[in-house]
Image (tube, helix red, strand yellow):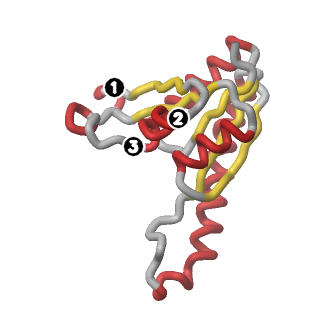
């Protein structure tokens, strides 16, 4: 069924919920996971006055990415699941979809925040991935009592 599962991860509570679900699914199916952290630099194009800190900001994002990807590596190891970690830069939804296509992923597993009634009209990264991915996307939405 699924041999390669992509788990986008940004360290948020909803992403962790999705990551755990993805690792547990992979363990049940004997699949491997790829965990992707996307560095999304804010404010592009940025004001000239802010450009001086861009390299420092990139380094901080990279260090954060390494830290959180390590969390998922540990969860995968606890479930005896093979885990590949990757970092990319760009628009999160576009990078997730592109990675899934480029690397031949069989499915994407993502967490999704509880947004209430009005929030469902706004959309987010998970919604954009669901609408644009060419592979199945499995979402695990947080409930109001998990906030």
- Per the image, the residue denoted by label 2 is 16
Q: Is residue 142 left or right of residue 26?
A: left
Crowding at dot 2, Cα within 10 Å, few <14 / some 14-19 / many 20+, comes out as many
What residue is rendered at 68% in x and 37% in y? 101
| Residue 51: x %, y % from top left | 53, 82
In this rendering, the label closer to the viewer, 3 or 2:
3
Query: Mark 1 packing: few (<14 Cα in 10 Å), some, or many (20+)?
Result: few
Residue that numbered label 3 is attached to: 124
Above or below for 110 versus 86: above
Relative horizontal placement of residue 121, taking residue 68 as reference (left or right): left
C-alpha separation, residue under disc 3 versus residue under disc 2: 16 Å
Q: Nearer the viewer, residue 102 or 140?
A: 102
N-terminal of the pair, mark 1 or mark 3, is 3
Quadrant showing the C terminus: top left
Q: Measured along the vertical axis of the image, is residue 31 above or below residue 101?
A: above
Camera-nearest label, 1 or 3: 3
Along the polypeptide, which appears first: circle 3 or circle 2?
A: 2
Distance in Å between CA atoms under marks 1 and 2: 14 Å
The N terminus is located in which quarter? Answer: top right
Assess disc 3: are there few (<14), some (14-19) or many (≥20) residues with their C-alpha within 10 Å of its C-alpha: few
Q: Earlier in the sequence, mark 1 or mark 2?
A: 2
Q: Secondary structure at mark 3?
A: loop
User: Residue at the location (46% across, 87% down)?
Assistant: 49
Q: Is residue 92 above or below residue 104?
A: below
Look at the numbered discs 1 and 2 and tell me whether their residues touch, using CB distance below 8 Å.
no
What residue is shown with label 1?
143
Percent position of residue 70, x then y:
69, 43
Q: Residue at x 38, y 35 (%)?
A: 113
Q: Secondary structure at mark 1?
A: loop
Disc 2 is placed on an element classified as helix
């Amino acid at each position: 069924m699924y041999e390669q599962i992509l788990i986008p991860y940004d360290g948020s509570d909803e992403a962790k919920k999705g990551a755990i679900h993805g690792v547990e699914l992979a363990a049940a199916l004997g699949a491997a996971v790829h965990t992707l952290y996307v560095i999304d630099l804010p404010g592009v194009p940025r004001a000239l006055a802010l450009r001086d800190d861009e390299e420092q900001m990139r380094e901080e994002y990279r260090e954060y990415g390494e830290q959180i990807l390590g969390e998922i590596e540990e969860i995968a190891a606890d479930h005896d699941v093979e885990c590949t970690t990757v970092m990319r830069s760009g628009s999160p939804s576009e990078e997730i979809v592109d990675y899934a296509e480029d690397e031949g992923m069989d499915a994407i597993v993502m967490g999704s925040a509880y947004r209430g009634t009005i929030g469902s009209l706004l959309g987010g990264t998970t919604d954009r991935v669901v609408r644009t991915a060419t592979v199945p996307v499995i979402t695990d939405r947080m409930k109001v009592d998990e906030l």
